[in-house]
């Protein structure tokens, strides 16, 4: 497709993981078969013996410069160490496609360094759409608004697909209507089950059951507290706020964990009996103070399986992941030689991309939240849901950015059943831009986050680099055609 449409050939020069690099030999006489074939990239990477090293990687890529004019580096990790290399790559005139959120939402000094390198790189592309909306054009829409002369006033969004999924089950418009009718003395609506087990007119799912379902589907981060604490959503808001020109740090974001969990994560909270909760509490408070946790965290208990980035693995694998680990397999921690933290595409088993980030139950890792903690949070959330439904409203996990004041917050909010957020069903994202031109009715980006979403987002940005480098960065050529139905209509 790329050769036919843009007269461009793609050649894979290097693959890098946490431990080793697979490098194509820099020889301009090599044929296509001598580069890395993505059909067997796993085998090539397994057989690689060259230790991962950023300086050696840059040196290797520079060898291709004389006969490969455009070099592109794709960062699909979740590593601060890798994010710190983006400015270097830009200075070497490498195009960078970034799916690493820590480049946009990491330390402010790092983000400013990347901005300076991007501005100085001239025509070199630095694209990072996948960091916020996966495959949805959130950042691209924002930039087009600004470049088109519009002014963004404020943004409201449901930016966490996992929390959107959970609360679309926990708090439905039908359940709110039924509860409100009951509160006002009307006859209770009858409930009929849909084929998927969800009530058709009013019965909601308990929070703890929705969390477990999201875990099995692979919608949650491998550290699920990142989702239900609001840290994942706040990180995306941080990246989006910086794109709006705000010098944000984590401490500037008012992020409220879901009811029940906020008491466990507070500064003055007593030590939790759960080691998992206590470990995350320390990391959460450090993040709130603007101290981003390093790639190598404090060593956890021996029986604890370390979290890994399932989303990043799917993106790297291009939507196909195999060879699930045995339940007893563990990954050692504390090695400072690991460049990519704990991402490893060989650790996941995604059986059905159409159903989302499908984590097989046989993969051996249970939801890493103890039942007592989950019951505590479930009880508090259920009371909050009942209160919202009594008011005829539904609960949604909403983020807001006020560009004028710099106020950024993410929390549970009660919204009307007619609101766009109340209509979200499943792992859907919704970002609404209120601007000078779109005041009363916002410009809205809305869509589901599916398994291949991040991979497709990365690929679309690769196509953008291709169009830019080939001089085809203009409206594509339309070839008009007539169909049989059109011909039949022309007869009359």
Image (cartoon, grey):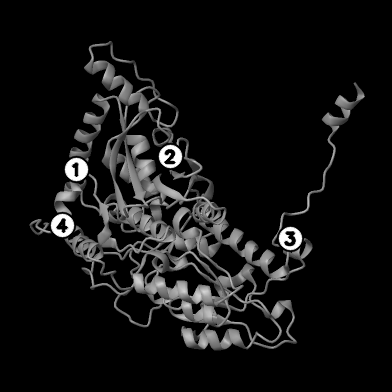
Q: Quadrant of residue 81?
A: bottom left
Find disc 1 in the rendering and name its residue: 375
- Kindly indicate whether the residue at mark 2 contacts the one at mark 4 (C-beta within 8 angstroms): no
Q: Nearer the viewer, mark 3 or mark 1?
A: 3
> Residue, x 53% and y 46% (percent of image)?
354
* Circle 3: element type: loop
Q: Which element is circle 2 on?
A: loop
Is 108 drawn above or below residue 56 in the view shown?
A: above
Left or right of 227? Residue 309 is right
| N-term mark: 4 or 1 | 4
Q: Which residue is mark 4?
A: 274
From mark 3 to mark 1, how far is it between C-alphas? 52 Å
Q: Residues within 10 Å of mark 4 (few under 14, many from 20)?
A: few
Rounded to the nearest angstrom, the CA distance separating label 4 from label 2 is: 30 Å
Percent from the top left, x then y, of residue 265?
17, 55
Residue 203 horizontal side relative to residue 256, left or right: right
In front: 81, or 440? 440
256 to 95, vertically: above or below = above
Query: Callout 2: 10 Å neighbours few (<14), some, many (20+)?
Result: some
Distance from Cα at disc 4 to Cα at disc 3: 53 Å
What is the x, y in percent for residue 83?
42, 73
318, above or below 469, in the image: above
In this view of the protein, which residue sits in the foreground, 383 or 45?
A: 383
User: Real-space Cα distance between discs 4 and 1?
Assistant: 13 Å
Pick the front one: 92 or 313: 92
Neighbor class of circle 1 (other Cα within 10 Å; few <14, some 14-19, many 20+) is some
Residue for point 67% across, 66% down? 468
Instruction: Return the mark for residue 426.
Output: 2
Callout 4 touching callout 3 (CB < 8 Å): no
């Amino acid at each position: 497709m790329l050769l036919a449409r843009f007269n461009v050939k793609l050649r894979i020069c290097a693959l890098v993981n946490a431990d080793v690099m697979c490098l194509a030999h820099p020889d301009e006489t090599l044929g296509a078969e001598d580069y890395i074939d993505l059909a067997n990239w796993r085998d090539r990477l397994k057989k690689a013996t060259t230790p991962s090293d950023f300086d050696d990687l840059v040196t290797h890529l520079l060898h291709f410069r004389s006969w490969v004019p455009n070099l592109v580096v794709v960062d699909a990790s979740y590593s601060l160490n890798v994010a710190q290399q983006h400015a270097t790559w830009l200075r070497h005139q490498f195009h960078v496609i970034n799916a690493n959120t820590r480049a946009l939402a990491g330390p402010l000094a790092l983000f400013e360094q990347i901005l300076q390198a991007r501005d100085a790189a001239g025509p070199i592309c630095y694209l990072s759409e996948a960091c916020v909306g996966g495959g949805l054009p959130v950042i691209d829409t924002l930039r087009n608004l600004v470049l088109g002369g519009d002014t963004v006033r404020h943004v409201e969004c449901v930016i966490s697909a996992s929390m959107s999924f959970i609360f679309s089950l926990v708090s439905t418009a039908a359940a709110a209507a039924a509860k409100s009718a009951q509160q006002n003395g009307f006859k209770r609506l009858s409930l009929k089950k849909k084929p998927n087990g969800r009530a058709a007119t009013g019965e909601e799912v308990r929070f703890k059951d929705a969390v477990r379902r999201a875990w099995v589907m692979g919608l949650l981060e491998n550290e699920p507290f990142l989702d239900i604490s609001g840290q994942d959503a706040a990180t995306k808001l941080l990246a989006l706020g910086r794109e709006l020109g705000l010098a944000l740090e984590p401490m500037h974001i008012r992020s409220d964990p879901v009811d029940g969990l906020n008491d466990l994560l507070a500064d003055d909270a007593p030590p939790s009996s759960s080691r998992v909760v206590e470990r995350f509490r320390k990391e959460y408070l450090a993040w709130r103070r603007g101290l981003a946790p390093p790639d190598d965290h404090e060593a956890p208990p021996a029986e604890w399986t370390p979290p890994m980035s399932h989303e990043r693995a799917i993106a790297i694998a291009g939507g196909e992941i195999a060879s699930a680990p045995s339940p007893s397999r563990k990954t050692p921690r504390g090695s400072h030689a690991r460049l990519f933290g704990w991402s490893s595409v060989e650790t996941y088993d995604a059986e059905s991309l159409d159903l989302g980030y499908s984590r097989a139950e046989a993969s051996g890792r249970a939801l890493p939240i103890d039942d007592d903690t989950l019951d505590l949070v479930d009880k508090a959330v259920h009371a909050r849901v009942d209160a919202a439904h009594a008011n005829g409203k539904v609960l949604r996990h909403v983020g807001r950015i006020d560009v004028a004041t710099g106020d950024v917050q993410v929390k549970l909010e009660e919204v009307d059943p007619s609101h766009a957020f109340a209509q979200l069903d499943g792992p859907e994202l919704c970002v609404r831009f209120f601007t000078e031109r779109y005041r009363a009715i916002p410009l809205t980006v809305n869509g589901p986050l599916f398994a291949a979403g991040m991979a497709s987002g990365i690929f679309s940005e690769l196509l953008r680099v291709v169009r830019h480098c080939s001089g085809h960065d203009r409206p594509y050529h339309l070839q008009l055609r007539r169909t049989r139905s059109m011909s039949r209509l022309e007869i009359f």
